[in-house]
Image (cartoon, rainbow, N blue to C red):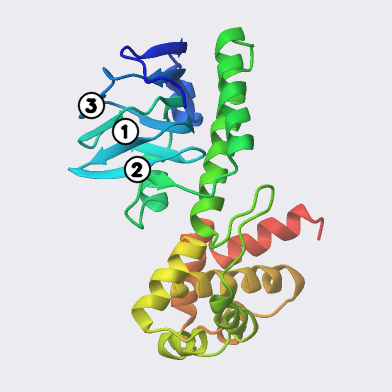
Amino acid sequence: MREWPEQTKILVSLFHTPTDAAREMFYCALRAGHLIAGADYKRAHPNYPGHKILLCLRGNGFIEVHGRAYAVGPGQIGWIFDHHSNKHFPAEKSPWEMYWIRVDGPHMDRIYGTLTSSGSPVFAGVDATASAAIYRRIFQIMKVRPIAMEASLHVEVAELIKHLFTARHSANPQPGREAEIPRSLLKPMEAMQLYFDRPLRITELAATAGMSVSTFFRQFKAATGTSPIDWLRRVRINEAKRRLIETDDTIAKIAGEIGYCDQFYFSRDFKRMTEVSPREYRARERKHKGR
């Protein structure tokens, strides 16, 4: 076991100041580094802009959010939303070595909220080798500062976020594989996919999964990122898109055949999800196909 240093060792420390346009378009890396936290290390940044995402390489540490501490061990990633009251520090006599980045960008707060909806800001089961390679590529980009720097950093941060979604939403995450839907949800999801035109009830879907309604809602959202009702609506809208392009059926007929009792509610949902009306969508897509 490595000796616990009295003073924190900074191995890499990098800074970047993105343009306003880059902040609007991309996930931006504002700072990045590699360090071994010593006995003197205890960081607290209340109301500090951005999000700190750290990968524990070895040793052990803690993230404290709103007074609650979460352990972070080797191969795990901790996400600190700096706007919240927080601290992070090594465990006693543990040389906590980490890669870290502080990022910001469009919808980052919402991504954090979705990923930590279970309550924990610590991610176990991540592909630590692939994640570590992402951090090193970010370090290299920030050192070299290529012409396409902002876009390159965006790609790497997005890839890291993908790893976190995979870890959080997979019951048994495996490196290099996409997260799988839990087996308990396969039957209700298949029912919604096949019988989207029927008035499916949540109680029936939950029973198919062998769960209470509240458990079904919670597990469904954890696996898909949305509610069962919203997921079913999107299945219906996908079918509507196909029929709008491939058939000459009226909008009212399409609405009725995909599970909507009222054309008005169908048109409202369609526009909310696509930003255009069914009629506009049909005209645009057929024109694009040369019809």
Mark 3 or mark 2: name the one nearer the start of the chain.
Answer: 3
Binning the other alpha carbons within 10 Å of mark 3 as few (below 14), some (14 to 19) or many (20 upward) gives some
User: Which residue shows up at 58% across the image and 35% down it?
Assistant: 131
Q: As drawn, is 87 to the left or to the right of 150?
A: left
Q: Amino acid at mark 1?
A: Ala
Give the farthest residue toward the top.
144
Residue under label 3, please give it. 44
Q: Amino acid at mark 2?
A: Ala
Task: Answer above or below: position of 193 versus 42.
Answer: below
The dot on residue 91 is 1
Single out the mark in the foreground, 1 or 3.
1
Q: Amino acid at mark 3?
A: Ala
State the SS at label 2: strand
Task: Answer above or below: position of 213 versus 86.
Answer: below
State the SS at label 1: loop
Q: Are marks 2 and 1 in contact (CB under 8 Å)?
A: yes
58, 262: nearer the viewer:
58
Mark-to-mark CA distance, 1 and 3: 16 Å
User: Which residue shows up at 58% across the image and 60% down it?
Assistant: 172
Residue 118 point in image, percent of width and height: 36, 58
Single out the mark in the foreground, 2 or 1.
1
Residue 108 point in image, percent of width and height: 41, 39
Q: As drawn, is 39 to the left or to the right of 181?
A: left
Single out the mark in the foreground, 3 or 2.
2
Binning the other alpha carbons within 10 Å of mark 2 as few (below 14), some (14 to 19) or many (20 upward) gives some
User: Which residue shows up at 47% across the image and 23% down it?
Assistant: 29
Residue under label 2, please give it. 71
Mark-to-mark CA distance, 3 and 2: 16 Å
